[in-house]
Image (cartoon, rainbow, N blue to C red):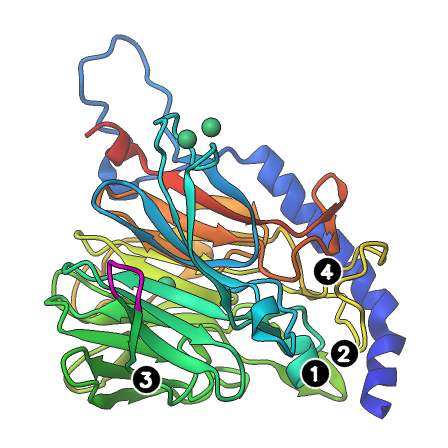
Amino acid sequence: MLEQRCFIASAPAARALLAALLTAVMLSAACNAPRLPGFGGRDSRNEGGNNGPTEPQGPIVETVLTGLSNPRGVAVLPDGSIMVAEAGSGYNAVDPQEWTGRLSHFQDTNRDGDFEDEGELTIWFRHLPTYNALQEYSTWRDEVSGPGDLLRHSDGHLYLSVDGGHDRIGLYEISPYKRIGRNLSARGNMNGLAFSRDHAQIYLAESTANALSVVNIADAAHRKVAQFGALASGQQSVPAGVAVDPRNGDLLVALFSGALVIEGEKLPVITGDSAVVRVDPDTGAITDAVLGLTTAIDVAVDSEGNIYVVEMCSGHADLIEPSHDLFDPDQTPLHGGYLRYSGRVTVFPPPAAADAPPHQADVDATVLAEALDMPTNITLAPDGSLYVSTGQGTPNRPIPGPDGPTTIVGEVIRITLPDVNSR
Ligand SMILES: [Ca+2]
Ligand SMILES: [Ca+2]
Ligand SMILES: [Ca+2]
């Protein structure tokens, strides 16, 4: 209780600071059009023989799905349709029929560019586990878990990680005929998944265990690849996302960074302590790839070695009591632990040499999208576009938004890069 009182006493000052920070974030979002300085050297090339100066072209950011409940992993199918895992509402009902985790298929059958017209949604599974860490683990943060990352194998099978809390953890194999088959791993929660280049194995970012493991699809044999130590302030590393560098098979892992309690104050986010590291899949050797990040939660790598990073938020705000009613639509708008609308997607070039120093986020980041509301997952589609899931937290809960009070809405955005547009 002492800890709680300490936090509440310091809350007004923290709120004022965070309000200022939020304003700064919003202003910078309004003033800075999406930009790609020097990304891949393509901006300045201006091929095509246009007369006169050409406007530097930024990425196109579109909302392709809205009204979801904690969208997480997205898998893009060869026909351009997408499968989306949703962690659900977080309401951990006694009756499994009331669980709201889902796996759904979205097809743009009328080809108007979105997946929101009649008949474009087919729900494959609608009662998968869901819970909120605020209630289960008293984290003082609005944090929903359930179905998590999703991969589509070249043979058509899907692999879905599920964190439904105690005894409801799995990496499930799902046939193209909508049958849930084997559970390949139930050792601990798996926030991020990535195939090995030959699709024979799946790498697992095991956030609670602070480990990176690999599981063979054929026989479900499990092997730990790396164990991550503490980050700069002594907090746990919390690996949240993993990607395979298609050029050499290296693993890129997003280390989200764990919470700290300093002098009784709960600090869910230590700004700048999050990182992306490169892991040798054979030796487990770990080297820093990008430093100075905040809440790096997922990562992707393209065929040229460019590293795409999702940061969930830029700080913490309005921690909430475990007794807070997340489902009361008349609650005062509160951030709920993490600063809303402060997430972003950035890209970093491949290292110039094997022994090049790591990138520094404040210097080397090219921003592709910012002021996002709590993004969690990124998927690099075969056509080079990026699908990012946003809106982590209890769906419909009142929160402060960029234009005043709003509510949490799960969405999937698509980021189309300039070099992709001109292909
Ligand atoms: Ca459509
Ligand atoms: Ca439409
Ligand atoms: Ca992922």
Could you tell me how far apart the alpha carbons at marks 3 and 2 are, in whole angstroms?
A: 30 Å
Label 3 secondary element: loop
Could you tell me how far apart the alpha carbons at marks 2 and 4 are, in whole angstroms?
A: 14 Å
Counting residues from the start of the chain, the first of labels 1 and 4 encountered is 1
Q: Is residue 369 magenta?
A: no
Q: Nearer the viewer, mark 1 or mark 4?
A: 1
Q: Which label is found at residue 335?
A: 4
Q: List the residue tagged with mark 3.
A: 185
For the C terminus, give its image quadrant: top left
Determine whether 216 is above or below 178 in the image. Answer: below
Could you tell me how far apart the alpha carbons at marks 1 and 4 are, in whole angstroms?
A: 16 Å
Q: Which label is found at residue 303?
A: none
The amino acid beneath tag 1 is Ser
Which quadrant of the figure has residue 331?
bottom right
- Residue 20 coordinates in the image, percent (x, y): 75, 53
Could you tell me how far apart the alpha carbons at marks 1 and 2 are, in whole angstroms?
A: 5 Å
Foreground: 405 or 263? Answer: 405
- Residue 107 coordinates in the image, percent (x, y): 35, 40
Foreground: 44 or 338? Answer: 338
Determine whether 149 is above or below 363 in the image. Answer: below
How would you classify the magenta stretch by its main secondary structure? Answer: loop
Q: Residue at x 30, y 40 (%)?
A: 38
Counting residues from the start of the chain, the first of labels 1 and 2 encountered is 1
Q: Which label is found at residue 322?
A: 2
Label 2 with label 4: CB-CB less than 8 Å: no
- Residue 276 coordinates in the image, percent (x, y): 37, 69
Label 1 with label 2: CB-CB less than 8 Å: yes
Give the magenta-colored segment's residue range. 175-179
Q: List the residue tagged with mark 1.
A: 138
Look at the image and tell me whether residue 357 can be seen. no
Could you tell me how far apart the alpha carbons at marks 1 and 3 are, in whole angstroms?
A: 26 Å
